Amino acid sequence: MKPNIYTIPLKQLASGEILSLQVYKFTGNQTGKKAYIQANLHGAEISGNAVIHRLIEFLMTLDNRKLIGEILLIPVCNPEGVNSRSHQFSSGRYNTYDGKDWNRIFWDYEKEDIDLEAFAKSQVNLTEVEIKNNYRQQILHSFHRQSEKINSPSSVPFYKQYRYQLQSLCLDADYLIDLHSSTNQSLDYFYCFHGREESAKSFLLDYGILMGDGEYDGDAFDEAFFKPWLALERSLKKLGKAIQFEIESWTLELGSGMKMNPESVEKGIRGVKNYLANKGMLKIPEFPLVETASHQIDLISRKGMKRYYAPVGGMIQNRVEPGRVVKQNQRIYQILNFNKNRELPKVIDIFAETDGLILDNSINHSVNQGDYVLGIISKNN
Ligand SMILES: [Zn+2]
């Protein structure tokens, strides 16, 4: 099976060059679900590009009867973020023009002026498939109204043009996977929306952050796609019609920033293949893997993620590494703290507030006061 490869111009620079997206689209010989997978929305988070490359190579070994539906793959999906540098460091988490986080800019249907309750009432006697189609049409109709403004003489800031291009490719998908990594040195984990815990097992990852009701604002890519569907499920439930739409959205965090750690890439490709096989989109030997049903995930609520920031400036030493379990009041790192008071330097111990697992460590061991140092996930917070 060969992909249809096409490019989408994204942004013309002052010097005339054009930054573009490139889409790899695989289409099965039977129609079915649509999966959308992108990587590298944050500039330093490159491991998903290797996952997409491996997926392209794998899909090319299959004939098109093995794919039901279509898969869109977009590596390096944020050229501006990908290319950002400060010395040899990739600094593309924030747009340098306006300071916005590249993953907090997306269009959320729920923030439009919509009357979801009225819509839910109008659909209550229809089938799940009919409701899904009707709602999707509403979302797309509302979304595409942005193009008038974009194409008007006054136009809109680039982040709105960018999100329009990216979301145009995915808003009609059934499954969305956004491949990130930590910007820091980190374990592999993922974000899971409430109600989708069973599906989450397919990724075969050990750790997940559970996003409970109301713990997401719709600005992130995965949230913008999925939040309106969760809202409709809630409205319909109030009317006595409990439906879980076959629509899902995931963010996978595959290892550390500025690296393509082979183990993280391996977990990513295995998880994505297993997920697509589990959803019936890929008919491939051995998948879904037998261990899927019994796979245990340490699923921790967002509130169970404790971030530690430097209380003073200095240099980090003797820090506990990702993957290690710590106890409350255990020392988790030290800061070598200098002064300009004609006093000797000090070494300050920092202790864990709770028991938990070290999830990540900042890459830079030099910290200004308030810089991020490490994250601990804990079930007891
Ligand atoms: Zn990210």
Image (cartoon, rainbow, N blue to C red):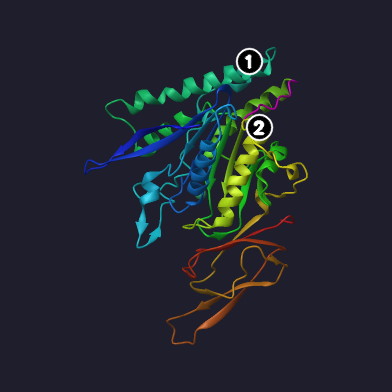
- The dominant secondary structure in magenta is loop
Q: Is residue 10 magenta?
A: no
Corner quadrant of residue 89:
bottom left
Q: Which of marks 1 and 2 is in front?
A: 2
Query: The magenta stretch spans which residues?
Result: 240-247
Q: Where residue 145 sits in the image (x, y, percent)? A: 42, 22
Foreground of the two, 33 or 355: 33
Residue 114 vertical position relative to residue 273 in the rendered view, above or below: above
User: Residue type at mark 1?
Assistant: Glu
Can residue 372 be seen? yes
Corner quadrant of residue 150:
top left
Q: Earlier in the sequence, mark 1 or mark 2?
A: 1
Residue ID at (31%, 30%): 155
User: Residue type at mark 2?
Assistant: Lys
Residue 279 is labelled as 2
Foreground of the two, 329 or 326: 326
CB atoms of marks 1 and 2 within 8 Å: no
Q: Where residue 258 sits in the image (x, y, percent)? A: 46, 57
Q: Is residue 242 magenta?
A: yes
For disc 2, the neighbor class at 10 Å (few under 14, some 14 to 19, many from 20) is some
Secondary structure found at label 1? helix
Mark 1 and mark 2: Cα distance apart in space: 20 Å
Residue 287 vertical position relative to residue 338 in the rendered view, above or below: above
Q: Where residue 371 sits in the image (x, y, percent)? A: 50, 64
Where the C terminus falls, by quadrant?
bottom right
Q: Dot 1 corresponds to which residue? A: 130
Taking 150 as reference, is 225 left or right?
right
Residue ID at (67%, 13%): 126
Residue 108 vertical position relative to residue 352 in the rendered view, above or below: above
Q: Where residue 114 sits in the image (x, y, percent)? A: 54, 22
